[in-house]
Every structure is written in structure tokens, then in C-alpha cells.
């Protein structure tokens, strides 16, 4: 699709201004229709590739467009700071809020520094520390998820990766402020879930959310990472699938061609949903907010046992 669009752009540049453009207009219309059809009927694996697109907006792009007066906060007050997890105070349409999310980095230097968005235990402990500050000062929390997963290295395991994630799950379930979660790209495994316990969970249209990456699943089941496309379909990782299962609450549309084609428009779609959701959640008494959050996650993964004969 991108190759076809590049060829059309090259053809437009080579065409003289005084030459009739009826054929070019027809080609533009046909390419536009092809693009709409392609993005409407993408497979789970194709959506995974779009979710990983290097130009896709990251957390800080949405922060720049949607929020004001962002002040980043660092450190977990126990070990160190994790650049993969970004936290801070900001204002959203005049209201003080707290922001938490992963940041992958744009160029090689940033990606190495931010570990490709894979947080270590200190990242999750930093996130929890800042969310507890939000609870202390009565600030709503927005989390933005875009990670392949928690960092799986030995140093992370030595410092208690599983414990840090588990503690976040427990503590987020009982924070007495609204928590609005948005999966903007990849929502990978426990690394995503550790900041995804909220009152509303949104997914951008071309984002994915799964217990394991398609490549990881294929490697385990078939010992062949090349079968990632088959695994992606089986995992049911798309926003449409997860909305049907009741795992997420709302699918946020993206501009035609994906969020990377127009970050400003993508942020506008997201901002509208965040505004409506925050207004609705802010009206709820704390006790009702917590009860609804608890019931929301208790409803997931229900099963029934057949009576023995």
C-alpha cells in the first residue's frame, strides 16, 4: 500500500502543471479506495505491524498535543529511574491530572536509553509511586500503554520484576481516583497489564493487546517464529476481538491509513473520548467507582463447570 502511494506521489511530481490531471485524479481516487478497503479488512498480524510502525505516535506525542504544563517525575525512591516508563503531573483542559506510560524512543539512541519501551521493576515502582501521589492529591490518572512487554533480563528478575507488576495490579485496583487506560500501540503481556487496571480501558483501532507476542506464541506452540501470523489470528489480539470479549470498553478510531499518517487527528479522536470518560467517572462517588472497577475485572475470564454424571 505504501509503495503504491509513493509511486503515485512520484507520478504527481513528474506531471507538468499544464497537463490535464483527469487520469491522476482517477488514480488518486482508486488508491484512496484501496487504502480504505485495506485498512478496513486488515488481519490481526497486519494490525500488529501497524501498531509497531516506527512513526506511530507515542505517549509523549499525545502529551504534547493534548495536555498542558507537563512536569516529568523521576525515580522509584528505592533503586533508580527507568526511562522506559514516563510519569508526571499535567493539566488536561484545565484540570490537574497524572500521566503514566511507556515511551519507546524514536531514534536508535533514544530506543536504547528507553529500552524499546520495556520497563524494569524500578519503572513499575516509579509508576505506582506517582499514582499513589495522584490518589493523595485527588488527581485522575491517565495511562498510555505501548510496550512489547516487561523487560525479561536477569537484572530485572533479580530486582523483583514479577513482584513489582503484581503489586501494581493490587494497588491500582483500589486507588480512589478515576483511572483511564489507553492502549496506543502494543499492549504486551504483564508489562502492559501493570498499568492497565482502570475504570475504562480504551484501544486505538490499530493497536493490539495480548498475553504474549505473536512471535513468542509461535515459538512456543510450533517452535517456529515464522508462524507469527497464524498465532496473531489465534490470540484474538485486535481491538475488535477484545471489545467483543468485554476486555476493553471502547475502540478509538484512527485517521485513514493509521495514526502515524496524522498524529494530530489521532490525538483529536483520543482527546474526545478522554474528555467524555473523565467527565462521567468524576461524577461517581469513590465507593461506587471502586466497586465498579472491581466488578469490571471480576467479570473477565468467567467459566462454568459441567456437573459430573
Image (cartoon, grey):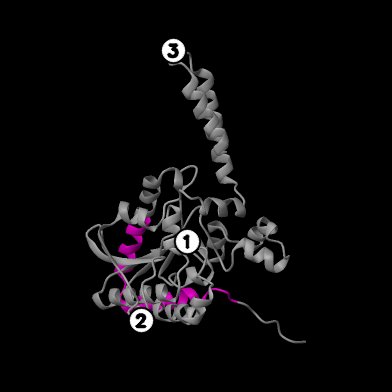
Left or right relative to 69: residue 299: right
| Residue 57, placed above or below residue 213 | above
Alpha-carbon neighbours of circle 2 within 10 Å: few (<14), some, or many (≥20)?
few
What residue range appears in magenta? 273-302
Camera-side mark, 1 or 3: 1
Our reading of the magenta stretch's main secondary structure is helix
Tell me if label 1 and label 3 are in contact, CB under 8 Å.
no
Quick one: 122 or 188, which is closer to the camera? Answer: 122
Quarter in which the C terminus is drawn: bottom right
| Numbered badge on residue 116 | 1
Percent of width and height locating residue 201:
44, 65
Q: Is residue 280 magenta?
A: yes
Q: Earlier in the sequence, mark 2 or mark 1?
A: 2
Percent of width and height locating residue 284:
32, 72
Query: What's the residue at 58%, 74% (across, down)?
Result: 301
Secondary structure under the numbered disc 1 in the rendered image: helix
Rounded to the nearest whole Å, what is the CA distance between mark 3 and mark 2? 68 Å
| Numbered badge on residue 159 | none
Percent of width and height locating residue 58:
41, 55
| Residue 75, placed above or below residue 262 | below
| Residue 273, placed above or below residue 155 | above
Rounded to the nearest whole Å, what is the CA distance between mark 2 and mark 1? 23 Å
Q: Earlier in the sequence, mark 1 or mark 3?
A: 3
Quick one: 95 or 45, which is closer to the camera? Answer: 45
| Residue 101, placed above or below residue 53 | below
Secondary structure under the numbered disc 3 in the rendered image: loop
Look at mark 3 in the image and give the residue it sits on: 18
Query: What's the residue at 41%, 43% (across, down)?
Result: 262
In the rendered image, the residue lying farthest to the front is 109
| Numbered badge on residue 78 | 2
Quick one: 27 or 297, which is closer to the camera? Answer: 27
Quadrant for residue 238, please give it: bottom right
Amino acid at each position: 500500500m505504501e509503495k503504491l502511494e509513493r509511486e503515485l506521489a512520484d507520478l504527481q511530481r513528474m506531471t507538468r502543471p499544464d497537463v490535464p490531471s483527469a487520469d491522476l485524479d482517477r488514480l488518486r481516487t482508486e488508491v484512496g479506495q484501496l487504502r480504505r478497503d485495506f485498512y478496513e479488512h486488515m488481519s490481526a498480524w497486519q494490525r500488529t505491524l501497524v501498531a509497531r510502525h516506527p512513526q506511530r505516535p507515542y505517549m509523549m506525542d499525545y502529551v504534547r498535543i493534548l495536555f498542558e504544563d507537563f512536569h516529568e517525575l523521576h525515580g522509584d525512591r528505592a533503586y533508580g529511574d527507568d526511562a522506559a516508563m514516563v510519569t508526571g503531573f499535567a493539566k488536561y483542559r484545565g484540570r490537574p491530572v497524572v500521566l503514566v506510560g511507556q515511551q519507546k524512543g524514536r531514534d536508535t539512541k533514544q530506543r536504547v536509553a528507553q529500552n524499546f519501551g520495556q520497563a524494569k521493576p524500578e519503572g513499575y515502582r516509579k509508576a505506582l509511586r506517582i499514582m499513589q501521589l495522584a490518589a493523595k492529591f485527588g488527581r485522575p490518572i491517565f495511562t498510555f500503554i505501548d510496550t512489547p512487554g516487561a523487560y525479561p533480563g536477569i537484572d530485572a528478575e533479580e530486582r523483583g520484576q514479577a513482584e513489582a507488576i503484581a503489586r501494581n495490579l493490587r494497588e491500582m485496583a483500589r486507588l480512589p481516583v478515576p483511572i483511564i487506560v489507553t492502549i496506543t500501540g502494543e499492549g504486551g503481556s504483564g508489562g502492559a497489564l501493570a498499568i492497565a487496571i482502570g475504570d475504562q480501558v480504551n484501544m486505538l483501532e490499530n493497536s493490539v493487546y495480548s498475553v504474549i507476542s505473536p512471535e513468542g506464541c509461535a515459538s512456543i506452540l510450533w517452535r517456529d517464529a515464522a508462524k507469527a501470523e497464524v498465532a496473531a489470528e489465534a490470540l484474538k489480539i485486535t481491538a475488535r476481538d477484545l471489545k467483543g470479549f468485554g476486555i476493553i470498553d471502547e475502540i478509538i478510531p484512527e485517521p485513514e491509513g493509521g495514526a502515524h499518517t496524522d498524529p494530530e487527528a489521532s490525538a483529536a479522536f483520543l482527546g474526545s473520548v478522554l474528555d467524555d470518560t473523565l467527565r462521567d467517572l468524576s461524577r461517581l462517588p469513590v465507593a461506587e467507582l471502586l466497586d465498579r472497577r472491581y466488578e469490571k475485572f471480576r467479570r473477565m475470564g468467567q467459566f462454568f463447570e459441567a456437573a459430573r454424571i
